[in-house]
Image (tube, rainbow, N blue to C red):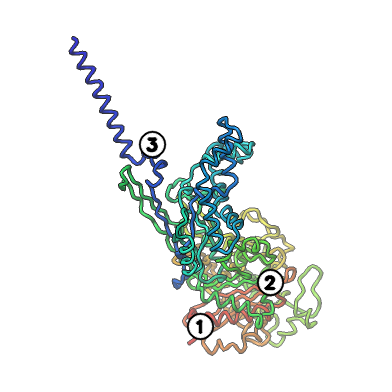
Amino acid sequence: MYNKRLKQFVYFFAIVAIICIGRLAYIQLNPKSVWQGQLEKIRRGSTRDLPSLRGEILDRNGKILAGDEAKFTLCIDYKYARLADDRFWKAQTLRRLNRGKTYAQADEQIKKDYSEDFNTLFEMIEKCAAFAGKTPEEMKAQINKKINAPLWRLREHLAWKRKYPEAESFSLAQPSTDKRLLLAYEVDLAEMHQPQKLITFDNDDQMLAAQLTLINVEGVKIMPKPERLYPYKQTASQLIGWVRPWNPDEEQIFAEHELEKYRHGDIAGFSGIEYICESVLRGKRGKIVYNIDNEIVRRDETQFGQAVQLTIDIELQDKIEKRFKNCAMNQYCKKPAAAVVIDVNSGDVLAMVSLPCFDLNKARSNYGTLCSDPNKPTIDRTINNRYPPGSTAKPIILAMGMQEGKIGPGDTIACTSEPAPRGWPRCWYERKYHLGHSDQWGYEGGNSARNAIRGSCNIYFSHLAVRLSPKKLQRWLWDFGFGHNALDVPEEFSYGDGRQRTFRQMAGVISSRIPDDCSSLESLPPITSAERRFFGIGQGNFRATPLQVANAFATIARDGIYKKAKIFAGQNDAGLKNLEMSETTLMTIRDGMRAVVSADGGTAYKQFRNSGFEEKGITVFGKTGSTEKPYNAWFAGFAEDKKRNAIAVVVLVEGGQHGSSDAAPIGRDIISFCIEAGYLDGQ
């Protein structure tokens, strides 16, 4: 009986011992165990992050618009940098006071614990200041600004979210400043155990000088770090966008993915393509995990960011921007402006010019200046500013009227030398010459469709618009691409949870008041009957973006086939719709637009008559426009070669007085640039 109980006792303890040994082996070998987690904190070197590189942004020809380049930087350990931060010292004092120490005892203990590290920091600041040509006080301020302040903000943010996840703010959840300080101090970040960037070297000579100066200074390292560079500087700046350091108060789009989520020191897209395509540009950091014997137990490989290729031709874009800025050729060279070029057959946007622009490489440091500039250089005027389209709307109005059977190609609408009735638009020709277009075209069949476009007759198009019902007018404008967003972003740039960023763009206005919802034609407010006369000449409440105008003319050039413009290489066609415009309608519009640039009396004839395009086999179809309140000058149209290659062009000059003299010459030169670039075959 006794032996049996003894055996049971031995068996019991043997089983317990086996369980304990197995558990010990599990927590020793399993990298995900609690023990290993604590061990990582103790050993500090048992995990190592592998940096990723951000993907490139390319133009249609593979030219790099944005890319990472290795730059050597002077980095210092946070162990020393934190000693320049007053918050660190205050937290040390508070912790000791909370343990029952007096101020004198706390001060004595702090000096004992950190005197050696503080001396190292002092030496570091002295030598870094001497190398950088700064005073020690300036170098200390730089350490606080570049290293301590961002890390402390991140610690505060995490302390708030961990302790008070439902609170609207840290201060509301915890009113005590001292308690918030201590909670933030308790947050341990991986970045606190990694060298932090302080100075980036511009060249190898600076790096060598730093190595010689700081060779024996503890806690200082010279390390390669990627830096985002924009080779074309200002060109296409609003479209390309730029990056800046991630802020913990911003959207954490990769929060559920350990190796993708943002950390202090990471950069994130802030605007343009850099922002929109963050999901594929960002990449994924790698990680190596070591066991207690410093052997690799897990390795997550780095995934570099993918390249994003655009449809724009950066060299063409650069030429157009320089043409606008040439004050010898453009009296409005200091004024804001925009231009769009579309390859008609593919729908690819070849250029999206918005001026003024800014140097992307200096955007972060100059951001305050950019935001305060009254000309708003950060706004992309091609898609994010809406303008009355003026007389560029007239070919579209003619298309509506002819398709709805309200006018024929030979029908005339009288434009006499008499002033227009009160409340109706006045014809510019009558105001300038005291004659009507009916008088001007009397020997050519009167104020017919062709001649009304050729001379840009306000009377003709305001009366034609009134013949259309408000609903018909609005539907046709919608079908031509007005009133809704002009650019889409492919699904491949969405995030794992289905969210997707898109362009900051305006839908424009094709109603008598600004709509709250532009998602469908049915959601728009109506056009009032009285306002149709102003819509007919592209004024009143009618508003459009330059890209919308360019794509409407591309639709005419495609014989009435509408599709959305594309900015991403390889993007599928979207919004395809056949507007079923008759051959008579298309030929009449083309005849009038060709006369604008190639026939005497055309509003852009003087600017195009010596262009030599006809001799090269290039046919140009144009339309000028001018608006008042606000004053803007427009040129819009398309050009074709004998092989049916075609490009649509729009030029907008803010403050311009006359589309014929202020915008048409730039449009003419853009067509020449397109011939030089091979988009049109000039034989």
Drawn side of residue 361 relative to residue 604, left or right: left
Tell me the tag on residue 676: 1
- The one of 343 and 118 positioned closer to us in this rendering: 118
Kind of residue sitting beneath label 3: Val
Across and down, in percent, residue 214 comes to 48, 60
Compared with residue 248, is residue 93 higher up or lower down, i.e. above or below? above
Kind of residue sitting beneath label 1: Glu
Q: Secondary structure at mark 1?
A: helix
Residue 104: image quadrant is: top right
Drawn side of residue 95 relative to residue 654, left or right: left
Say which residue appears at 19% left-offset and 17% top-offset: 7
Compared with residue 32, is residue 434 higher up or lower down, i.e. above or below? below
Compared with residue 529, is residue 640 higher up or lower down, i.e. above or below? below
In the rendered image, the residue lying farthest to the top is 1
Dot 3 or dot 1: first in sequence order is 3
Across and down, in percent, residue 308 comes to 45, 64
Q: CA distance from mark 3 to mark 1?
A: 66 Å
Dot 2 or dot 3: first in sequence order is 3
Q: Secondary structure at mark 2?
A: strand
Q: Secondary structure at mark 3?
A: helix
Tell me the tag on residue 338: none
- The one of 280 and 23 positioned closer to us in this rendering: 23
Q: Which residue is mark 3?
A: 34
Contact flag, marks 1 and 2 (Cβ < 8 Å):
no
Kind of residue sitting beneath label 2: Glu
Tell me the tag on residue 654: 2
Q: Nearer the viewer, mark 2 or mark 3?
A: 3
Drawn side of residue 125 relative to residue 660, left or right: left
Compared with residue 441, is residue 531 higher up or lower down, i.e. above or below? above
Contact flag, marks 2 and 3 (Cβ < 8 Å):
no
Dot 1 or dot 2: first in sequence order is 2
